[in-house]
Image (cartoon, helix red, strand yellow):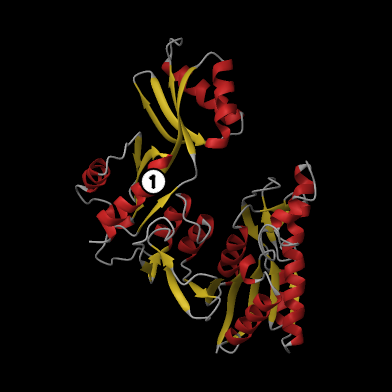
Amino acid sequence: MNDLCVMKFGGTCLSTEEDRLRSADLCIRELESYRRAVVVVSAMGRKGDPYSTDSLLDLVSAPIPHEKSCLLACGEVISAAVFADMLRQKGIAAIAVTGWNAGLRTDEQHCGADLESIEIEYLNASLEENDCVVVAGFQGMSSSGTVSTLGRGGSDITATAIAAALEAATLMLFKKIDSVYTADPESVPGALKVDRISAEDLRQLAWLGAEVVHPRASEIAGDAGIRISIKSHSTGEPVTEIEPFVIRSGKYITGVAAGSDAVQFRISADSYTSLHEFYSNAFGLVADAGVSMDMFSVFNGAAMFTVPLEDEERVSEVLIGNGIICETISPCAKVSIVGAGMHGIEGVMARFSAALDRAGIDMLQTVDSHATISALVPLHQRDEALRVLHREFLEQ
């Protein structure tokens, strides 16, 4: 019998009494193969459900950051207490603990904090006295001793970080899906099931818009050499294995993804004598406005970048208000192909651009890395671009 496993149940796996009973039974089934378990839980349900994160947030109009984190952390704490009670009723020695009790330590950002370390003494002591420790995900404690939350998908981070810190034999993420796919099946009917994928490729897909596992969780898993098994909540069986190493499968592209709605800014340095001063000032103004930029291109006294569509007015005001000429194209979306195996292979960009050109899709801007190629396209062409790229690289 193996010593320790870590399991994570997301909000949709805990929404109803039936879902929670199913999750508890799955946990007990796994304990037949492991001496002890840590179970990380999210808040129960999604928007509209009484204890979901969104429902809790709707209770207040404009909370200060510290109070907002305290409020948002409640959903997971409730979920942990309820789940531990269900396990005890089924004969399992279980205890619920908060994320800060479990030793998760973060930076000083109250909402969307970065996890910095885990102090495992309390977890180890709890595991000595219980078969199962149920941890409230998504939360921790800052260095100043205040409650912090990790942002959307933070329970994935909690589970992966705990698995790494405790050197768990297995990390299982239970989800209401039948597989990880090469694309969003709702946008790409030809999307294929993925049996195995590397943590790096999944991380890239997640950063670029896929919503399966939080990208930070994939990064932690890859760095720690952890193998993650995504399991079906309905059957308990593995549907996709996430490996900590690059997988050579014969296809060098593992998936396509699209990001959130965006706007492209084009700015000119006409009124500046120093290009260095222009770029530094323009990018600094956007950063000081609290807006994240993407897809940077700098050339001949001008620059292009994208920001989330909801930030278009704010960025326009700050740039124009400081005398910077700007033009915008919106709405747009970034579409990408992902695959660490493409590095060093000739002609990938040529195929990428030719496929979009044949379909009459406008490429407004491109960026690439060793594992991704992305193009900015008009929003109304996003789904067609995804289908075209999927056919080009994954359906042949």
Residue found 59% across the figure and 16% down from its top: 321
Residue furthest out toward the left:
346
Secondary structure at numbered mark 1: strand
Image coordinates of residue 222 in percent, x first then y, are: 45, 62
Residue found 25% across the figure and 42% down from its top: 353
Residue found 58% across the figure and 60% down from its top: 157
Image coordinates of residue 244 in percent, x first then y, are: 42, 66
Regarding residue 191, the answer to whether it shows in the image is yes
Q: Which residue is mark 1?
A: 335
Image coordinates of residue 52 in percent, x first then y, are: 71, 60
Dividing the picture into quadrants, the one containing residue 32 is bottom right
Regarding residue 129, the answer to whether it shows in the image is no
The quarter of the picture where the C terminus appears is bottom left
Residue found 62% across the figure and 71% down from its top: 13
Image coordinates of residue 258 in percent, x first then y, are: 43, 49
Picture layout, residue 295 above or below residue 236: above
Q: Nearer the viewer, residue 76 or 35?
A: 76
Disc 1 marks a residue whose amino acid type is Val
Picture layout, residue 216 above or below residue 283: below
